[in-house]
Amino acid sequence: MQEIIRTESLTKRYGTHSVLQNVSLTVHRGEIYGFLGLNGAGKTTTIRMLLGMIRPTSGTAYINGRSVIEAKPDLWQQVGYMVETPYAYPNFTVRDNLRLIAKLRGLPENSATESVMEKLRLTPYADTKAKNLSLGNAQKLGLAKAMIHNPSVLILDEPTNALDPAGIVHVRELLRRLAKEEGMTVFISSHILEEMSKLASRIGIIHGGALLEEISSREFEQLRRKRLTVKVQDRRETASRLLLQAGYNARIADEGNIEIADDEAIRQPERVAKLLVDADLSLAGLTVEEEGLESYFLQRVSE
Ligand SMILES: Nc1ncnc2c1ncn2[C@@H]1O[C@H](COP(=O)(O)OP(=O)(O)OP(=O)(O)O)[C@@H](O)[C@H]1O
């Protein structure tokens, strides 16, 4: 698999304050890499170094195999980015803001502008001044500026912060389609954990300036704990005892439901149901619950 983004032991210190320590990560072509961390974990610092905006104290960042600090300007024709709150000229309309960027980038102004507005569903706001946009649409304008030149690498710092749920779904679908159909590589930082678990194909967890773990979404699916939750109308203790006798690792949880953590029960919940029904216990619910990324993340961080 072709490596598009790579960092080698990226380290950043401000005086004696160490912000990033030996971060080495890789992102392959067509991947959506979710860079996850709490506030202050070092996400923006890493992204700024990926974009050559600040110099690492030591270590190197590469895009398309080229060191970003030494790269010639043509590298940036393949890269789109949005870091923190995107700036737009407040008294220019959405269309004029985009036309300006298109012009600066030497793109055909009309077609590039109209096509990116269409992609981000900004066309209805084409004539709205940037200062009058909602936060969500201002963020979409930032994304449009980042994508106007159809880059093959897109680097986004917390891009869905201000979007409403429909906006988040739209941007997620768009990024997924670009990654899948056009092989675009997306590096996206966030602290919205569930959102990342739906979008990213690989996840890197950063905490206190160190990369704790890199994991594929598939591995994450396998690793995260699952459990079968059983709700019975009454005679909870009897049900729990019965399940224990049958060899299940059952326990009564705080809310009064019975939880079973065995793989066997998760794979074949109908067996659990049959056992209870055969014993004349009335079943009110049976659900397989998966640990969310949030709880997985907090557990990893606390370790
Ligand atoms: N120029 C600077 N001088 C000193 N410390 C800095 C500087 N820039 C960032 N830091 C510190 O580095 C740490 C990491 O900051 P960074 O902005 O990379 O975190 P983040 O993960 O992006 O967090 P957030 O989600 O809050 O933006 C923080 O403790 C921050 O205070």
Image (cartoon, rainbow, N blue to C red):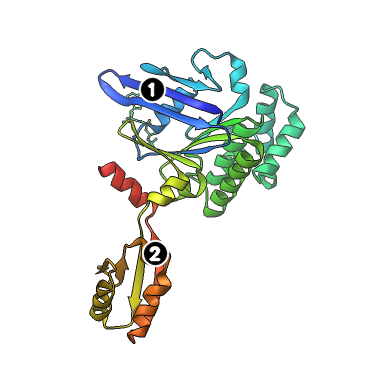
Lower sequence index among marks 1 and 2: 1
Q: Position of residue 226 (x, y in %)?
A: 37, 59
Q: Quadrant of residue 57?
A: top left
Distance, label 1 to label 2, CA atoms, is 42 Å
Of badges 1 and 2, nearer the viewer stands 2
Three-letter amino acid code at the position of disc 1: Leu
Seen from the viewer's position, the closer of residues 213 and 277 is 277
Q: Quadrant of residue 203?
A: top left
Residue 29: numbered disc: none
Three-letter amino acid code at the position of disc 2: Ile
> The C terminus appears in which quarter of the rendering?
top left
> The N terminus appears in which quarter of the rendering?
top right
Mark 2: few/some/many CA within 10 Å (<14, 14-19, 20+): some
Ligand 1 falls in quadrant? top left
Residue 146 sits above or below residue 275 on the image: above
Label 2 CB less than 8 angstroms from ligand 1: no
Seen from the viewer's position, the closer of residues 116 and 239 is 239
Residue lying farthest to the front in this orientation: 246
Q: Position of residue 175 (x, y in %)?
A: 59, 42
Seen from the viewer's position, the closer of residues 226 and 35 is 226
User: Is residue 192 found left or right of 32 in the rendered image?
Assistant: left
**Which residue corresponds to mark 2?**
266
Contact between labelled residues 2 and 1, with CB atoms less than 8 Å apart: no
Q: Position of residue 2 (x, y in %)?
A: 56, 28
Q: How many marks?
A: 2
Q: Is residue 28 visible?
A: yes
**Which residue corresponds to mark 1?**
10
Residue lying at 33% horizontally and 51% vertically, measured from the top left: 295
Residue lying farthest to the bottom in this orientation: 280
Residue lying at 49% horizontally and 15% vertically, measured from the top left: 69
